[in-house]
Amino acid sequence: MFDTMIIGQISLDHNIDYDGREEYISGGAVTFSGYAAAAIGHSVAVVPKGNSKKLDPAVTFADSKVEKIFAVESKTCTEMQNTYFTADRERRECLNTGMIEPYRPEDLPDAEAKIYHLGGLVYGDIPGDVIEACAKRGDVGVDVQALLRCRNEDGSLELRDWPDKMKYLPMIRYLKTDAAEAEVLTGTTDREKAAFMLCEWGAKEVLITHNTEAIVCDGKQIYRSPLRPRGLAGRTGRGDTTFAGYLTERLTHDIPEALEFAAALVSLKMETPGPFKGTRQDVYDFIEKYYR
């Protein structure tokens, strides 16, 4: 029994920074979420799908504390080209230059988890029947990115509404969006109103991330915690880290405690490029210094 099972592909990311620097790294929600959740002391399994000859999951997670890798083979691999236009990495262009074969319910391993965290990257990665299969096993956490981010013929990505949201939102305990995704789903730029709407449509707890704060709605009230990073070199993977921290902390803490921990975790992570490789004590120390 794992605390969390993270289902999502590793992506081969070609990052072009605002100053012209380039790098090739392993990215994707499963990478940032897996490292973070395991680093803060939780029992984590990952289910990456891709072409292992091109991108080896064992190499990607070699420096992590992830307990088990249930790799699923695909003929193809997800590849992304990210071009950043500003130093804070808030403005970027993302091109999807390759996609995995979609996950199927039979890709789920013969293992149990308290939370099934679905972290795909592009619409089509994780079909509705996978959400349904996970919901039959336990609590489901969904990063809505993979249900809204659609690939155009030229590889560009755009956010479009999720046509099946009313069917599947009631199956989701934890739903994560950013401010832009929440607007696409609900039609409102008011993050608090959007969070309440998503709860009304069936999600039990809605986490909405923003570059200044993270908020959670449980259908009754809004909880919030600021982000307090001292640097932005590690901005990539911000939402994935926040969600992983929140999900796993909710196993043993109430919403305000889990949210503050997740906000502090991602604030600390944003100071260093790549996934979070610190410790739980590092997060506690950061909370004591910057949140007390």
Image (spheres, grey):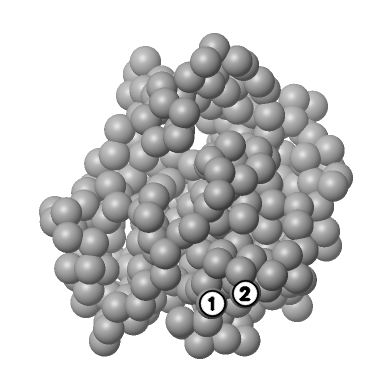
**Which residue is at the front of the view, 195 or 20?**
20
Q: Residue at x 76, y 52 (%)?
A: 277
Tell me if I can see residue 268 in this picture.
yes
Give whichever of 228, 168 is nearer the camera.
Answer: 228
Disc 1 to disc 2: CB gap under 8 Å: yes
Q: Position of residue 147 (x, y in %)?
A: 37, 49
Where is residue 272 drawn, in percent x and y? 66, 42
| SS for callout 2 | helix
Whether 243 is drawn above or below 200: the answer is above
> Dot 1 surroundings within 10 Å: few (below 14), some, or many (20 or more)?
few
Task: Quote the CA–CA distance across marks 1 and 2.
Answer: 5 Å
Disc number for residue 288 = 2
Q: Tell me: residue 149, above or below residue 19.
A: below
Residue type for callout 2: Glu
Q: Residue at x 51, y 64 (%)?
A: 263
Residue 154 screen position, x and y as percent: 37, 15
For the question of whether residue 31 can be seen, the reply is no
The disc placed on residue 251 is none
Q: In this view, which residue lies farthest toward the top?
A: 20
Q: Secondary structure at mark 1?
A: loop
In the picture, the disc for residue 292 is: 1
List x then y, in percent, for residue 51.
71, 31
Tell me which corner region of the image, top left, top right, bottom left or bottom right, holds residue 90.
Answer: top left
* Residue 119 horizontal side relative to residue 217, left or right: right
Considering every residue shown, the one lying at the far left of the view is: 187
Quadrant position of the N terminus in the picture: bottom right
Name the amino acid, label 1.
Arg
**Relative height, residue 52 to residue 177 (above, below):** above
Q: Residue at x 75, y 70 (%)?
A: 281
Q: In which quadrant of the rendered image does the C terminus lie?
A: bottom right
Q: State the residue at coordinates (56%, 57%).
A: 266
Please tell me how crowded label 2 is: few (under 14), some (14-19), or many (20+) other residues with Cα within 10 Å: few
